[in-house]
Image (cartoon, grey):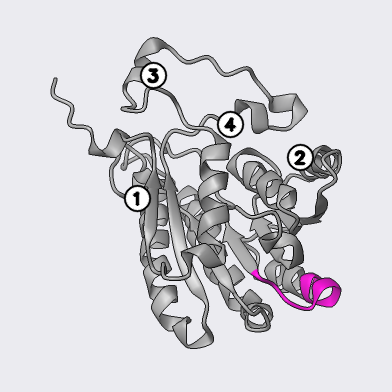
Amino acid sequence: MSNTYYKSKTVLITGGAQGIGLGMAEAFTREGAAVIITDVDQEAGKEAVKRLQQGKGNIEFILCDVSAEHEVVALMEKVGEKYGLLDVLVNNAGIADPFMGNLQEMLMSEFDKIMAVNLRGPVMCAKYSLPLLKKSGYPVILNISSTRAFMSEPNTFAYSASKGGLEALTHSLAISLAVDRIRVNAIAPGWIETGDWQKKSQKYKPQHSKEDKEQHPVGRVGTPEDIAEAALYLCSAKAGFITGQSITIDGGMTVKMIYK
């Protein structure tokens, strides 16, 4: 990326206090953007701000549960009051644990909670950020999906369904918001190691076996930086002819045929 493109941009990243979200926040602040991160974990949010301010980043944390409509409305009001507009919305917040037990034992309340955060949340964030995005000269929405939208392990019903819905939402929004010049794309990460990108009380040193690495054609597990670099590109003018697309970033795992 250039050293100037994001210097005048305002970027909102939901679920930005840890993991992939924090990796993207670091990348956008490094490029000079004013970045707002949201999260339900206040401790993680405060740590993230401290971490990124050490790198001279223009970073702000706002506590927000994206599954609560009134909190999303309040979030966008705060962003509007301070910045006046929004250039980039990154819908990253999500309940990451995909496993729910077998279908017969699954609690519908758990299913509904995951769908509310992972799918309804992005819909509401897009809806209530729209007036701010329309004020931007180059508005972009980026959804963080998952390769589990396309392939599954057993008993991952809600997570897979929510990410599959997010994929469909991406191309639907791209067509619906084209009249407002808003580009909408998605990134579908595969195995991304976030141990170094957690709050202090949950941080751990990643350890991957030879088998873990070799099941990826590129020979390693992914990192938040891998997703962040793609996000910088997709949200920039360099990707101006890309909309309604989903980019899989998984080290080649989903195209590798495996016979047992």
Q: Residue at x 73, y 47 (%)?
A: 30
Q: Is residue 144 left or right of residue 204?
A: left
Q: How far apart are labels 1 and 3 at the CA level?
A: 21 Å
Q: What is the three-letter code of the residue carrying label 3?
A: Asp
Pointer 4 or 1: first along the chain: 1
Q: Decide which of 183, 71 is in the foreground and name it.
A: 183
Q: Is residue 120 visible?
A: no
Q: How far apart are labels 3 and 4 at the CA level?
A: 15 Å
- Is the Cβ of the residue at disc 3 closer than 8 Å to that at disc 4? no
Residue behind mark 1: 149
Q: What is the three-letter code of the residue carrying label 1?
A: Ala
Dot 4 falls on a residue whose secondary structure is: loop
82 falls in the magenta region? yes
Q: Decide which of 24, 238 is in the foreground and name it.
A: 238
Q: Residue at x 63, y 47 (%)?
A: 24
Dot 3 falls on a residue whose secondary structure is: helix
Q: How far apart are labels 3 and 2 at the CA level?
A: 28 Å
Dot 2 falls on a residue whose secondary structure is: helix
Pointer 3 or 4: first along the chain: 4
- The stretch in magenta equals 78-87
Q: How far apart are labels 1 and 2 at the CA level?
A: 27 Å
**3 up-or-down from 137: above or below:** above
Q: How far apart are labels 4 and 1 at the CA level?
A: 20 Å
**Mark 4 against mark 1, which lies toward the viewer?**
4
**23 up-or-down from 69: above or below:** above
- Is the Cβ of the residue at disc 1 closer than 8 Å to that at disc 3? no
